Amino acid sequence: MNFENKVVIITGAARGLGQEYAKQFASRGAKVIACDLRDCDDTLNIITNAGSEGLALRTDVTSAESTREMAEAAVKNFGGIDILINNAALYGSLTFAPFDKLEESEWDATMNVNVKGIWQCCKAVLPSMRERGGGAIVNISSLAATYGMPNGLHYTASKAAVIGATRGLARELGRFNIRVNAVAPNVVNTDATGEVFGEKRDKVVEVTLSQQAIRKPLETEDIVGAVLFLSSDLSKMTTGQTTMVDGGTVFL
């Protein structure tokens, strides 16, 4: 999969999966705009070390102004936008508890970032993708959306909404040759996962593996292939789909 001269925006790119996506796109020739509320300078170093060009932007995906500035920077520096990876999400910082114990403010914040953020980013890139005659959008959902995560209803509901948004966007944007798909990973070995589960991490991994057909923990590099495929011309007639990358936990 060659992304030579393609321009890719990746949100939530300061660490973890977003940083891995940036590395892999850059190593295949893409110009990568790494966006996050956190500093993305480390990710930009990875992009340039992979032999490509990029930008590191502070972006609030919930803000129309911030996402518009993100898209404008991509167009100004690289001429347009071909691919958007909607990876930004609240996860590691969330409190997980029975649904009736969740704070309303945390529920609202989760929906704001995980769902509204995708809407804002898609709106921001649409003019450039239309002008270029098409594009690819990949939204990152979660196994939680299809399996159901106990004590995480805010996260589960938000990631289920990502799948619904993916389907609706695919219907609307197909006439512009813009494809919209989702990837839904199981628990991945990242810093955010460590923050969520803390001391219970090993036990969570053990239970997770017991439900997978392929009993191997997921690493960041295990998710990349699906994201690259759905971003590439190899999937040019695939849209509105959710690809589970969960070791064989849920079969759709």
Image (cartoon, helix red, strand yellow):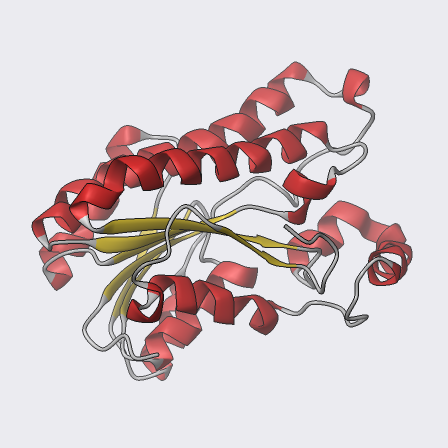
**Image location of residue 128, percent across then percent down:** 14, 48
Total marks shown come to: 0
In front here: 191 or 130? Answer: 130
**Image location of residue 44, percent across then percent down:** 36, 68
- Position of 188 compared to 8: left or right? right
Instruction: Give above or below for 101 relative to 122.
Output: above
In front here: 16 or 228? Answer: 228
The reply to whether residue 221 is visible in this rendering is: yes
**Image location of residue 201, percent across then percent down:** 84, 56
Residue depicted at 30% across the width and 79% down the height: 2
**Image location of residue 156, percent across then percent down:** 66, 34
Residue depicted at 28% across the width and 30% down the height: 64
Which image quadrant is residue 168 in? top left
The reply to whether residue 125 is visible in this rendering is: no
In front here: 40 or 117? Answer: 117
Which image quadrant is residue 5 in? bottom left
Residue depicted at 48% across the width and 27% down the height: 112
In front here: 57 or 98? Answer: 98
- Position of 233 compared to 189: left or right? left
Instruction: Give above or below for 207 relative to 152.
Output: below
Query: Which of the image's four quarters has the N terminus?
Result: bottom left
